[in-house]
Amino acid sequence: MIRLSLIIAALVAVLASACATPSRSIFLGAGSGAVAGGGVGLAIGQNATGAVIGAASGALAGGVLGYLLHRGKESAPGASSMTDAEKYPFLTRPEVRTIWVPDAIEGDRYIERHRVFVIQKNSSWSKDND
């Protein structure tokens, strides 16, 4: 049973550290801990009371672990508070004009109404968010 608990704790640690926001890290840690703790509590106690106690303690431990792992990731050396949008330029959207071409008969050919897209201005690199 101790090995199973260690495996579950390691899985919770790995899953909780993969989130980008503190709230997601905490909720994923708490959810994973609740599921793992409920399973372990049911296996040890063989009743619903053991499962509830295990789920509650697992949720608490997983939430705390998710918070601590996320906080450690934020304060890691070399971590920057700038987002990718602030660090790197991005491509702007091109300006595109739509032209509707009406139905046409050219000799023995019938051309159905359709759209033609014309690029007015190509995309370009920009650092502005406007």
Image: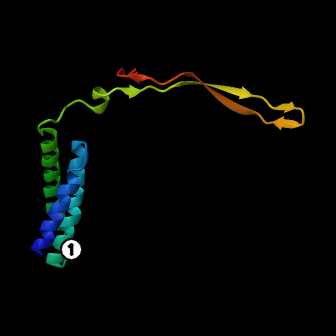
Q: Is residue 88 above or below residue 46?
A: above
Residue sitting farthest toward the right: 108
Q: For residue 58, say whether it is visible.
A: yes
Q: Is residue 27 above or below residue 91?
A: below
The residue that appears at 24% across and 53% down in the rendered structure is 28
Of 103 and 121, nearer the camera is 121
Q: Quadrant of residue 60?
A: bottom left
Of 23 and 51, nearer the camera is 23
Q: Quadrant of residue 7?
A: bottom left
Q: Amino acid at mark 1?
A: Ala
Secondary element at tag 1: helix
Please provide percent x and percent y for residue 51: 19, 70
**Mark 1 closeness class: few <14, some 14–19, many ≥20 residues within 10 Å:** few
Please provide percent x and percent y for residue 66: 17, 51
Residue sitting farthest toward the front: 107
Q: Is residue 104 above or below residue 127?
A: below
Instruction: Say which quadrant the C terminus sits in.
Output: top left
Q: For residue 49, say whether it is visible.
A: no
Q: How is the image coloured?
A: rainbow
The residue that appears at 20% across and 65% down in the rendered structure is 36
Q: Is residue 60 above or below residue 45?
A: above
Please provide percent x and percent y for residue 8: 18, 65
How many marks overall? 1
Q: Quadrant of residue 11?
A: bottom left
Determine which residue is flagged by label 1.
48
Instruction: Say which quadrant the N terminus sits in.
Output: bottom left
